[in-house]
Image: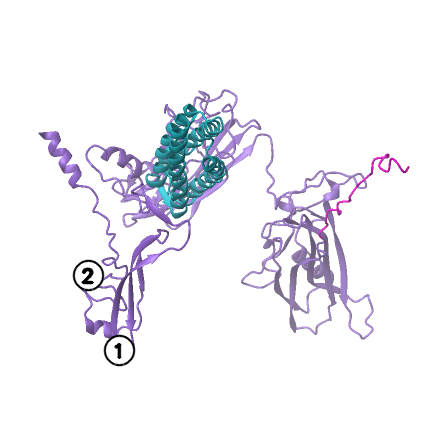
Chain colours: A purple, B cyan
Amino acid sequence: PADIRDAAQARDRSAPAPVTDVARLCVCDLLVAQCDVNCCCDPDCSAEDFSLFTTCSVPVVTGDSRLCSQKAAVYSLDVEANPPERIFKLIDQVNPSIFCIHATNYKQALYLKTPEIPTPENFDQLLDKFGGATFSAEPDSWNLDTDAQNPPDANETSRYEYGVPVQTEDAFLRLPSPVVSSWCSDANPAAFLVNQATKCIRSVSVEKCDSIQALSMLFYINSSILAVPKSSQMVNITVKSIVVQSLNGMRTLLSSSDVLRLPMVLDELCINAVLGVNYHITHTDTGEIIEAAAAFVLGAISKETLSIEQSFKISFTQENTQPVPLSGNPGYVVGLPVRAGFQPQGYPFPAAFLSNKHSQLTILHSTSTQDCLAAQGARAPVLFGYNMISGCKLRITAAMKCQPLAQTLLDVLKGQSFPEYVASFGNSQAQDVLDWVPITQLHISEQMISHTLQSSCQIPVSLGIEVKWTKYGSLVNPQARIVNVTATITTTTLKQLPSGRERIIPITSSVVFTDISSPAEPSYKAWPTIDIKLPFDFFYPFV
Amino acid sequence: LSSLPLQILLYVNGVYYIFYFLATLAMIIYKSQVFSYPDNLLAPDLAVLFLMAILEVPRLYLGFKGNLTEAEAPLGLSLGLTVGSVVLCVYLLLWQTYVLWADVLLNAVLLSAYGLESGLKVTAIAAFVS
């Protein structure tokens, strides 16, 4: 009796039968018990409502038009009559094609599939399949001890590959990041060789300061990283540095980073809460992790704060290498700094170029004071493709001597170490001498037409760097290549001022990028030639 | 004497059957692409079509042989095979998953050919026996 009742209940709980009578189907009938405007098939409309319509939004209701003959309900408005009335006709629509469907013996052929109705028997299976935020084909298995995964091949998983999640003792190295909203999700794994930087918001409260795991340093360093996937060799995460940020935003670097500082409540503040983690992983060239370091930023949370923003960063370096950030591969990418360098002594012997942060191509950075002599040293890197102009104002008094002034202005315009060579490609190696373009230096002096002698002093007033670049490579993926760099210094004569007077002259520096690529010439394959040779005895009887 | 109308009909049946087989196969392929045709319904339809093709060859051969040699045994066997072909033809006419109008036409023509053939075969057998 119990199972008979269950079966009857299961049958009752099936989906409602679909409506197939075209006379009763109405797609535009959206309002219940109210007349929809211009909906001629709406049963809630009366004759007066029909007389106010202008047109019928749904003129025909039919079933599948591929059937040979089917019923169709045709609705139209007779505007000639006074008042206008709705005409409803039920006609037989015939499909004249020879491939029209005469009959089907398959009930669901022309209808949508009815979904499975949940019953106590299949509820668990339906929940597994459709219960999550996303429907996925395979189950989400981040644990290392699943039997669903294929047994690993000894050769394949003896190293990390690009994009593979970095594994730790329990699950994986976490890099919390915003998933759908800005709230932090701890389920984002860090992928090998993928440098990432994420920022997300976490909800906090001072009372639960020491119980929220994500605020404590231990959460980020306690599980050691596996050197290779699925191995037993561990790499501990060392704490490289700790920076403490006070409530007003000032950051101090702590001298000793050995002590683990855990969050605790002090004077209604929660101190030592993690505000940012910067992971730095060193690996070998065979995909094995040998070192892992983390730099923390700890801060304090006050009682009123309900949420804090945490930032996380991870970067990978190969052992025994100095990473040089590329500005493109191979062509320059717009927005990345132009790489420049010096040729060390040893000319004319081709030597490698020195290229480091101190020898970047930079221009003067305008400051708020706009005084050339006051704000010395503020420079901005030249980014490829971005034309820049900057300047400052120079106040000349009578007491200033020309020569030192000229030297100071030259320093202001060119910077402390103005490079001699610029990399032609974004990934030019220091050893390839031919990939570097020398900077041509020009001097232009604004001479007055009055024949002032050259002996009077000249001070530089503007520096213009013109970078000529061209498109190089294939037509569909052109790469930017720097061909020529010219630095032009314009000087002007410094007229001697009467004592007590002072003059203000503007000093400018600019960078201009010019595209000198010649128009591309597509090259075509040669026309195929017809190569016919008659056999030598083709004209047999006659030759 | 061999029955001339039966011979003509058997010959025309052979030619028509080739056209019928190719057209029905092409339409089944068309239906499987355009409509929702699950594999468990496609398999029986294709099986019936190929079975009918396999039956048709001995059927026509026996019909030719029986009529030309004026022997009633092959003709009788051919008649028996015709019954099987008729059943399969009726399946394709009525109980296929999708019956298109073209299907109806092809199968109706084939069915009428079978009916006419059966009648002529019976007459021929009666003539040969007596």
Label 2: which secondary element: loop
> Which SS does the magenta portion mostly show?
loop
Pair 1/2: label in front: 1
Location of residue A96 in the rendering, given as x and y in whole percent from the top left corner: 40, 55
Distance between the Cα atoms at labels 1 and 2? 29 Å
Dot 1: chain letter? A
**Which residue does the numbered mark 2 point to in the structure image?**
A32
Which residue is found at the position 59% from the left and 54% from the top?
A380
Instruction: Tell whether position A533 is magenta.
Output: yes
Q: Residue at the far right: name it.
A: A543
Label 1: which secondary element: loop
Q: Residues within 10 Å of mark 1 (few under 14, many from 20)?
A: few
Residues drawn in magenta: A522-543
Residue A81 numbered mark, or none: 1
Q: Residue at the far front: name it.
A: B130
- Left or right of residue A68, residue A125 in this image: left
Quadrant housing the N terminus of chain A: top left
Quadrant housing the C terminus of chain A: top right
Residue type indicated by callout 2: Val
- Left or right of residue A529, residue A97 in this image: left
Instruction: Tell whether position A537 is magenta.
Output: yes
Q: Is residue A222 above or below residue B20?
A: above
Residue A318 numbered mark, or none: none
Asked if residue A54 shows in the view, the reply is yes
Q: Which tag, 1 or 2, sits closer to the chain's start? A: 2
Location of residue A105 in the rendering, given as x and y in whole percent from the top left corner: 31, 41
Which residue is found at the position 70% from the left and 72% from the top?
A497
